[in-house]
Amino acid sequence: MCQTDSLWSRLCNSLVPALLVMLAGCGYIGEPLPPALNRPVIVTDLAAVERGSKIIVQFTIPKVTTEDLPIKGNEDIELRIGTPNDPFDMAAWQRTSDRVPVSAKGAAARVEVPASKWYLKTVDIAVNVHGPSGHSVGWSMFVIVPVVPALPVPEAVAATDAPDAVHLEWHAAAPEFRILRKLEEEANWNLLSTSTKPSYADNTIEYGKTYQYLVQSIEKTGATTYAESDLSAPKTFKPTDKFPPAVPAGLTAVPGSRSIELVWERNTEKDFASYRVYRGGQLIAGNLTAPAYSDRDAKQGVKYQYQVSALDNAGNESVKSPVAEGVIP
């Protein structure tokens, strides 16, 4: 009996710790998790614009599910465009709208839809992305696009020098135009301004820089929506300062006891550099930045005739001012 008890004791001592280790390793077995639905997240950045003879639609294709898991397999991207019914019925819109094929590289989708079918109509555009198993969250928000006949592309964009500006002209008949500009070495275009005429004066230029311009016809179709033409060919232009400042005005000669004091109105050109003073047609002073000069070489009893001119940073000199006479009594 003792031997049996001893054998049993040894067996218990060896099995119980091993069993405890096994139980600890297994952990708690919970309820089984439901399978992932694999539904792509909804598209939130759908955008569309009419440009030229096409409606351009852009959006980001979802790459994760509503459970924040990567999508396994190929999505089915259902992009539709069609006119709304009144009252609006989603099922009817789906039946009557056109499905547009979508092909994209990576996550960015850009689709061009011919616009002629929809001229003078308003279309609703939406996208619904289905997962590989066919599940989806639903349709994106609608983008509403009023469609007009294609606007003309501005042609023959010309640039010429103007006083402290570049004067642009082009050929096209449209309600309004956008003017875009960039420096020659820059990559991105910036909206410079708009114009209701086929011309524009860019007075924000700096001499010594080379600019490129694009022009685009636009037509307002809603509170915040525009139809656009295709862009014009780019126009490259380096402005040259060929224009002198304005003639200094209001020149007055005031005699003193030993000098004749000259004063005139200040020039306001942004590229103004200096003044020159002439006496009897001869230059007697230059590089003046203030609109005043004291002629201390004037002799008593002699009548003098004075004129003033203005120069800009490029060295262009204005016409001389009208004559002002002065004499020291």
Image (spheres, rainbow, N blue to C red):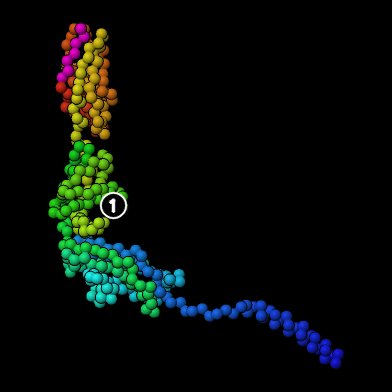
Residue at image coords 27%, 29%: 273
Quarter of the image with the C terminus is top left
Q: Position of residue 203 (x, y in %)?
A: 23, 41
In this picture, residue 64 sits left or right of residue 8: left
Residue at image coords 64%, 78%: 25
- Pick the residue in front: 233 or 204: 204
Is 154 above or below relative to 20?
Answer: above
**Residue at far front of view:** 87
The crowd level at tag 1 (other Cα within 10 Å; few <14, some 14-19, many 20+) is some
- Viewer can see residue 54: no
Residue at image coords 17%, 15%: 325
Q: Where is residue 151 in the image (x, y as percent from the top left)?
A: 17, 59
Residue at image coords 23%, 70%: 86
* Image quadrant in which you'd find residue 77: bottom left
Magenta region: which residues?
A: 323-329
Q: Mark 1 points at which residue?
A: 189
Is 294 above or below relative to 171?
Answer: above
- Pick the residue in front: 151 or 164: 151
Q: Mark 1 belongs to which amino acid?
A: Trp
| Residue 243 covered by magenta stretch | no
* Image quadrant in which you'd find residue 46: bottom left
Q: Position of residue 233 (x, y in %)?
A: 20, 54
- Pick the residue in front: 299 or 22: 22
**Residue at far right of view:** 2
In this picture, residue 128 sits left or right of residue 282: right
- Viewer can see residue 291: yes
Is 325 above or below relative to 212?
Answer: above
- Pick the residue in front: 302 or 21: 21
Instruction: Name the element at disc 1.
Output: loop
Is 138 above or below relative to 191?
Answer: below
Q: Position of residue 64 (x, y in %)?
A: 42, 70
| Residue 328 covered by magenta stretch | yes
